[in-house]
Amino acid sequence: MPVKNRFAELLPEIVGWRHDIHANPELLFEVHRTAAKVAGLLREFGCDQVVTGVGRTGVVGVIKGKCDSSGRVIGLRADMDALPIHEGTGVAYASTTPGRMHACGHDGHTSMLLGAAKYLAETRNFDGTAVVIFQPAEEGGGGGREMCADGLMTRFGVQEVYGMHNMPGIPVGHFAIRPGAMMAAADQFEITVTGKGGHAAKPHDCIDTTVVAAHIIVALQTIASRGVDPLKQVVVSVCTVATDSPAHNVIPQVVVMKGTARTMDPAVQDFVERRVAEIASGTAAALGARATVDYQRGYPVTVNAPANTAFAAAVAQAVSGQVDTDTPPLMGAEDFSFMLNERPGAYIFLGNGDTAMVHHPAYNFDDAAIPFGASWYAGMVESRMPSP
Ligand SMILES: [Zn+2]
Ligand SMILES: [Zn+2]
């Protein structure tokens, strides 16, 4: 099962969808135009069912195979949202909305899954049901979580679910995957330090919140360096420090720090949450100040089930013969994790070649990757539910 010939024929059409979506980027849950286009195309392809508004602006298409003796239902997922970045690609089909662009390739993911849906609806050469899932708000809004909360898995009977993301730095046509943790959990925290503000020339009359904040930032580094097994991955970054005074001669009353914590293991995640609170409040108390911590759990760890990973890798191998099955995990996070927490499945990287990294203004999805990605989506259905 190499790249399907049908996708060579469909390529100009799929590229057309991609460029149209690229020129009209939408953010988070506000993907109304994109979702309407997706739903319209799925209806045009003759999907057995097309449901909109799943998880606010998500779209689901159901395609039944020639027969259904297997009783199997496989979910394939793509994301539809763009990023608040000013596009710097200079391509003819660049964003028409200043300050927004498809800088993560979700335009490519959506178009490849549309291509696979068109092919599957034409051929129906499988025994079971394919559910194509188009989610909003992958870039921080939790669209995958919203679709799951809206009954995605139970309403459509999804038994397994597969996702794909392009990855710069991996050659076009190559795939990369690993069993187990593939992407990190991403939590965020906000630490508020309250002391006693005053004149900068009279520090002895104050409780200097900037000094307390500096001690907290340094002490937080011991979570990774002294607290967690060096063989386990953890990142704790303080990214924003804001005082309540812009002056050069005022000791601020309050300092607010914001940061992120990335982990690959639930026990490490629990440890980090506890230690951020203990270190902030303990350090502040030692220096006569007070610290409160608001710690919010974000996207969970993206965990590939071993059997489904082997299956996804085998289909990728059949498509291009180029699969890295032991790709290193990334400390970025992925909203598809919510779907993988509900059903077994796998998430695979598709090479985007030597391009700028995702989330960079010069990044662009490579249309040459489309036949590989679309063949993988379709191959997952045909191989997992072979027609008798
Ligand atoms: Zn992204
Ligand atoms: Zn992305």
Image (spheres, rainbow, N blue to C red):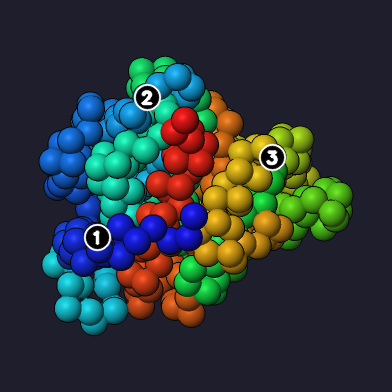
Callouts 3 and 2 close, C-beta under 8 Å: no
Of pointers 2 and 1, the one earlier in the residue sequence = 1
Determine crowd level at label 1: few under 14, some 14-19, many 20+ residues with C-alpha closer than 10 A: some
Quarter location, residue 15? bottom left
Q: Is mark 2 within 8 Å of ligand 2?
A: no
- Residue at the spot x=69%, y=40% of the render? 306
Q: Which residue is mark 1?
A: 10
Is residue 331 shown above or below 167?
above
Q: In this rendering, which labeled residue sits more in front, label 2 or label 1?
A: 2
| Circle 3: element type | helix
Residue labelled 3 has its Cβ within 8 Å of some atom of ligand 2: no
**Cβ atoms at labels 2 and 1 below 8 Å apart:** no
Q: Is residue 241 at all visible to an observer of this figure?
A: no
Q: Of callouts 3 and 1, which one flags the residue occurring earlier in the amino acid sequence?
A: 1
The Cα–Cα distance between marks 3 and 1, rounded to whole angstroms, is: 33 Å
Front residue of 191 and 138: 138
Mark 3 — residue? Answer: 306
Dot label at residue 67? 2
| Left or right: where 97 falls relative to 236 | left
- Left of 312 or right of it: where is 125? left
Pick the residue in front: 1 or 325.
Answer: 1
Q: Is residue 190 left or right of residue 132?
A: right
Residue at point 52%, 64% (across, down): 320
**Which element type, helix, strand or loop, lies under badge 1?**
helix
Q: Amino acid at mark 3?
A: Pro
What residue is drawn where x is 57% and y is 42%? 346
Residue type of the residue flagged with mark 2: Cys
Position of residue 388 measured from the top left corner of the image (x, y, whole percent): 47, 30
Q: Which amino acid, mark 1?
A: Leu
Mark 2–mark 1 distance (CA, rounded to whole Å): 25 Å
